[in-house]
Structure formats: C-alpha cells, structure tokens
Amino acid sequence: MIDSASQSAAHQVDLLDLRVVAIEVALGWGIRMKRWMTFTILTGALLMTTLAPLGATPDATPAPAATKKTFGKTPGGQPVDLYVLTNKNGAEASITNFGGALVTLKMPDRNGKLADLILGFDNVDGYVADKSYFGALVGRYGNRIGHAQFVLDGKTYTLAKNNGENTLHGGIKGFNKALWTAKILSTKGGQSLELGYVSKDGEEGFPGNLKVTVIYTLTDANALKIEYSATTDKKTVVNLTNHAYFNLAGQGSGDILGHLLTIQADQFTPVDSGLIPTGELRDLMGTPFDFRKPTAIGARIDQADEQLKLGGGYDHNFVLRMTMDHGESLAARVVEPTSGRVMEVWTTEPGIQFYTGNFLDGKTVGKGGATYPKRNAFCLETQHFPDSPNQSKFPSVVLNPGETYHTVTTYKFSVEK
Ligand code: GLA
C-alpha cells in the first residue's frame, strides 16, 4: 500500500518538465538546444527517480514520506484513503482525501503521553453522513453568506441555501463532501500531503472554475501547517478553512470549558439571529468576548449576553490584530491545564471563527465509540469574515483570473509544566 517513493519521483519529474517548458518559452532556443536540454534534464530526472527511493535526492535530506491505507468507499463505490503523517517525536496527523478531512492529530502531554486531540470518525462512512464538518476542508466559502446571494460586477449570483435563508460552508455539497486527489510529498519541512480539487464553474452557484490545492505538513517541531492555494478562470469569491474540532485533553474526554483561551483580537463581528454579521466591528473590551488575557472558555459562556444567546455560546468571528505584514501572525493560544498541552494558531488570515461546539448533541458516535455532546470541543477556524461578499467594509474575498489565492495556517503544539 505504500507508494510514496513513486509518487514523490513523479512529482520531481513533473517539476522538471515544467522547468523545461519555462526555459524554452523564456529564451526561445532552437530545436537542437531544446532537444539537448530535454535529454540532459530527463537524464537527470531518471537519475533522481532511481535515487529517490534511496533518499539520495540532491535536496537536503527529506523526511521519510507519509504512508497510506484504505479508509473505505464512498456511497458511489469510489475507494477512499487515509494518509498518515508522522514525525520524530511520534506525533501523528492523518488525513483522508474524502473532504480533505483531518481525521486524527496525536500530540504529547507534559509526560510525553500521546492523545488524539480532534473529533472525527473511524472510517469514511462517518464523514459521508457528517453534518458538523468534523476536521473537514471547507469551501468554496467558509461560514455564511447572507440570503444565499452576492453581487459581483453588477451581476447577482444565487447560491444553494443550506442554512435557513443563508449559505453555510460552501452550500449543499461543499468541498467537505468532495473526493480530493492526493499526492504524498517528500519535503524538507516534514511529511506532507498535497490535496487537489477543481470546483466547477456554477458549482453551488459560485462563478468560475476554481482550482484548489491544499498542503498539510506535520513538522518535527509538532506543528501542523495547512497551506491553501487557488486560481480561477472567472472573477469569484473564495474563503477556505479547516473545521477541526479540538479537545486538548483528548477527543471524547469531556467538555472544553476549562481550557484557557487567548485571542489576539480587540474587536469581533456581532451577528443577527441568522448568525450573519451586522457589519459592525465591535470593541470587545469588557464583554464576554474579551480573550485578550488567558481566560477559561466556560468562565462567561452562559452570561446573559445578547450575542452569546444568538450563538448558543461562542460562534463568532474575531478581528485579528495581525502583527505581521507578511507571513503568519499569532491568532490564538489555548492551554489545557490538566494535560499541560498548549496549542497556538498562527495564520495569514484576518479573522478567526471561535465556535464552542454549541450544535453538537452527543448523538453522533465518533472515533473509538466516543460520543460528542455539546461543548466537548472548540473550533478556531482561520478565515476572512463571514458574509464578506456582501460587506464592503470587510477585507475583500474576491479572486480574479491571473491571481493566486494563498493563505497559511499553522497549529503549533507544546506543553506547559
Ligand atoms: C461554523 C459555524 C457554526 C456551525 C459550525 C458547523 O463554526 O459558525 O454556526 O454551523 O460551523 O456546525
């Protein structure tokens, strides 16, 4: 079942082919020169293909590649895989190509004991039936678009309604229900998996063929990095995220109300009764949304606050301070006091949806027979703000042909004594 060596070799040849084309176009060399170049480069590629399985590529030593195993079949009978990334500390992240979902994330506690920190299912059937977006890649538009429509260049686009009057997480069949292509990459940064999906022009009402690539990397520093890229052939809107539900004491181990949370935000975007932002950027000082200092998630969650009532708890977008002009800024930090586990979220995105699993009902049977009652996990979904296509004051989510959408989010794990 392990075919990583051949996959990484194929990737290297692809890259070399691309380089040949680029050189030819840029310099307009004659036919003979091209033949010579192709011969030389293909010989090189052949050598690399032969050496790759031995770990002898010219790059600095790449990490050993991820492995894959079967994860079941879709209702249509298509085989689905589970890709397992590991690092030198024994940490593990596994990802399925169904919905690109992060299935497990095992990290050590202060005594080195591993636990799986995210909610999910033991096989693809759970993800096919799932309505909570467990661990999934979310697109084309993460979170809500009000009244399931938006206007772009004077044209109104009508989307699929799957949340009352609104569109949630891409519509009826979002990216979380798509079968992605998968390629194991051999990188210097750690074990990586590249997933691909082409969302057709008009899918769920969105314009443009959108070509999406997501790369998951597990590093030796116990970080899980997720890199999202997309291009389009028509002007469109894009907002991609991952919907992992975390419990730093271990999935299925109880509620997350004692986790201490810090969010690097001074404002949040209040919502109406349909959880659509009103457009206001509200100062959170002195409200139950003030997480500028480490505060237990449960400390104020049941306060008589209008916004908490609308969300049934926290289900709001925070406006991140974004300390870095380029690259990722620290967005949030969570400490679980009993295990000592710490998770930091770093991102290039301007917002983060803090959601306390208010819609979980305990009826779903998850991994290892665990059940997931209300508030047994939290989500920190890095994103552009909900309903941005209809909110001219929010950062733009428009992607034009010729541009590349590119965002990065990294979850970094460590322990406190
Ligand atoms: C997001 C939303 C929530 C809910 C979950 C999925 O976090 O903001 O309201 O829809 O996804 O259940």
Image: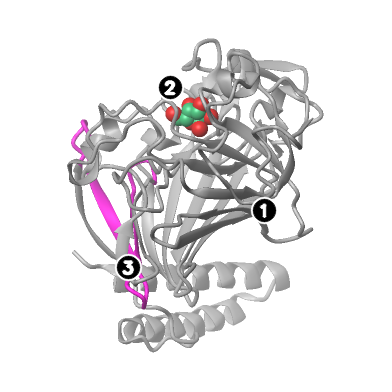
Q: Is residue 169 visible?
A: no
Q: In the image, which residues are magenta?
A: 73-100
Question: Which residue carries the number 1 mark?
Answer: 348
Numbered mark located on residue 409 in the image = none
**176 versus 160 height, above or below:** below
Q: CA distance from mark 1 to mark 3?
A: 26 Å
- How far across and how far down the image is residue 348, in percent? 67, 53
Residue at 60% across, 75% down: 31
Q: Is residue 82 left or right of residue 141?
A: left
Q: Which amino acid is tagged 1?
A: Thr
Question: Which residue carries the number 2 mark?
Answer: 172
SS at circle 3: loop
Question: Which residue carries the number 3 mark?
Answer: 66
Q: Which amino acid is tagged 2?
A: Ile
Camera-side mark, 2 or 1? 1
**400 versus 329 height, above or below:** above
Mark 1 or mark 3: which comes first in sequence? 3
- How far across and how far down the image is residue 135, in percent? 40, 43
**Residue 251 or 183: which is nearer the viewer?**
251
The colour scheme used to paint the residues is one colour
Residue at 42% across, 47% down: 246
**Residue 358 or 132: which is nearer the viewer?**
358
Residue at 46% across, 64% down: 217
Q: Which amino acid is tagged 3?
A: Ala
Q: CA distance from mark 3 to mark 2?
A: 32 Å
